[in-house]
Image: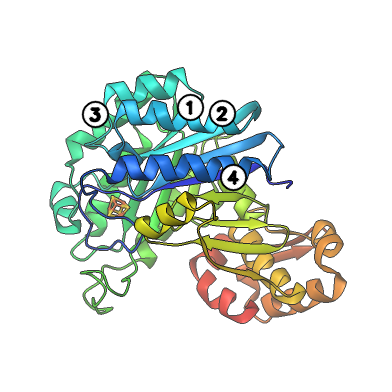
């Protein structure tokens, strides 16, 4: 298998946030051990199929810092036992401010972690509490400086469009993030997800998303963070290589409950249920619950949407080589049906302008 990227999903959280539809739950007694044993078995089975060294690894969730430092040592040992890494590999871990300890940072430093992505979301305590977050702004500040003091590349995730969020409070959060030594900032607009406490919020109850995003697109580059993807801004050389691989439709292995992977044109997803996941692996079966091999045209359209998320856009030469000239023409025509200030096109390819990124969902609907 030629995949050069590994994703590991840790399905635990201390409490569910009001907006969150990710697969995670509060761990019951013994579940973390059950998870680690099953994950080790899955890594072993996947290792038989994947001999190439990984360029990137991303351990996300859920809340990976719900695993104790000693459980992290077990996890790192299981990864090392089964896989190899290329020199200079990027290894990212996600962390929540209140559960990330100094001991976690020590384990990561002594292993091969290079990036820590912290779920800050806001520097406003009232907003954090409304979201149902388990930490306050001061804990986020302390987590960022602790991770920086260990020499990691640090990302902060932030959310805009929250109910009751003012333009002023968003501005304060973003200013503080940009002044805090981070190498990467990810911005997410709140979207009401079915089945979550905030799933029934009406457009009137949600905060405005357009103006805060537009301001961030202007402000962050002035502070040295270039927008390289719709939701992501980085100091030069600090872009997330793992995520760039997704957006370039590269292959990756996904492990852990609910993780998705993409190998040889086939997408698969593991079962969401930890019990089912552990049961499958105990009986020597991979825990896939669904998989599909995309027909070439659908593959081309999905690849186009992913590539257009990035400021570099679609590279015409690569795209035609991979998906054919006819698909490239169809995608160009779909993009060119929009007003000209939303995209740029030339012999190198097609890309969205900053304005185009602000209405990207309309463009995706036309392509897919
Ligand atoms: S900490 Fe993250 S994964 Fe867990 S419930 Fe909150 S948003 Fe979801």
Dot 1 and dot 4 residues touching (CB under 8 Å)? no
Front in this rendered view, residue 82 or 268: 82
Dot 4 and dot 2 residues touching (CB under 8 Å)? no
Mark 1 or mark 4, which has the lower sequence index?
4
| Image height of 200 relative to 27, above or below | below
- Gap between marks 1 and 4, in whole Å? 15 Å
In screen coordinates, is 172 left or right of 264? left
Q: Position of residue 95 (x, y in %)?
A: 34, 38
For mark 4, what is the residue? 45
Dot 1 and dot 2 residues touching (CB under 8 Å)? yes
Mark 3 or mark 2, whichever is nearer to me: 2
Mark 3 or mark 4, whichever is nearer to me: 4
Q: Residue at x 49, y 66 (%)?
A: 358
* Mark 3 secondary-structure assignment: helix
Front in this rendered view, residue 280 or 361: 280
Q: Position of residue 4 (x, y in %)?
A: 67, 42
Give residue 147's mark: none
Q: Quadrant of the C terminus?
A: bottom right
* Mark 4 secondary-structure assignment: helix
Q: Residues within 10 Å of mark 1 (few under 14, many from 20)?
A: few
Mark 4 or mark 2, which has the lower sequence index?
4
For mark 2, what is the residue? 81
Mark 1 or mark 3, which has the lower sequence index?
1
Dot 3 and dot 2 residues touching (CB under 8 Å)? no
For mark 1, what is the residue? 77
Quadrant of residue 197 within the rendered picture: bottom left
Q: Residues within 10 Å of mark 2 (few under 14, many from 20)?
A: few
* Mark 2 secondary-structure assignment: helix
Mark 1 or mark 3, whichever is nearer to me: 1
* Mark 1 secondary-structure assignment: helix
């Amino acid at each position: 298998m030629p995949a050069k990227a590994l994703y590991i999903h840790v399905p635990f959280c201390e409490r569910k946030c009001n907006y969150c539809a990710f697969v995670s739950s509060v761990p019951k007694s013994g579940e973390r051990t059950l998870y680690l044993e099953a994950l080790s078995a899955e890594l072993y089975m996947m290792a038989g199929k994947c001999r190439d060294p990984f360029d990137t690894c991303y351990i996300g969730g859920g809340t990976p810092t719900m695993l104790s430092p000693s459980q992290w040592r077990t996890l790192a040992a299981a990864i090392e036992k089964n896989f190899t890494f290329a020199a200079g590999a990027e290894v990212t871990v996600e962390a929540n401010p209140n559960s990330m300890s100094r001991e976690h940072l020590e384990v990561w430093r002594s292993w091969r972690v290079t990036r820590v992505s912290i779920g800050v979301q806001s520097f406003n305590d009232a907003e954090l509490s409304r979201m149902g977050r388990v930490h306050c702004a001061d804990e986020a500040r302390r987590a960022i400086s602790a991770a920086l003091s260990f020499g990691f590349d640090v990302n902060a995730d932030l959310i805009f469009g929250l109910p009751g969020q003012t333009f002023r409070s968003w501005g304060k959060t973003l200013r503080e993030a940009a002044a805090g030594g981070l190498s990467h900032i990810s911005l997410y607009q709140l979207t009401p997800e079915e089945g979550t406490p905030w799933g029934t919020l009406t457009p009137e109850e949600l905060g405005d998303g357009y103006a805060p995003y537009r301001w961030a697109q202007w402000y962050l580059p002035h502070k040295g963070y270039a927008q390289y993807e719709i939701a992501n801004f980085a100091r030069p050389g600090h872009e997330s290589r793992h995520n760039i691989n997704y957006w370039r439709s590269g292959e990756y292995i996904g492990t852990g409950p609910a993780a998705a992977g993409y190998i040889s044109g086939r997408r698969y997803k593991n079962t969401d249920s930890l019990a089912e996941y552990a049961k499958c692996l105990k009986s020597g079966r991979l825990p896939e619950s669904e998989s599909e091999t995309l027909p070439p045209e659908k593959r081309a359209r999905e690849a186009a949407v992913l590539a257009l998320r990035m400021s570099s856009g679609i590279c015409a030469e690569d795209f035609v080589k991979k998906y054919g000239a006819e698909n490239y023409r169809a995608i160009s025509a779909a993009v060119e049906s929009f007003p000209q200030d939303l995209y740029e096109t030339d012999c190198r390819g097609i890309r969205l302008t900053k304005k185009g990124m602000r209405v990207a969902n309309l463009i995706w609907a036309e392509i897919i």
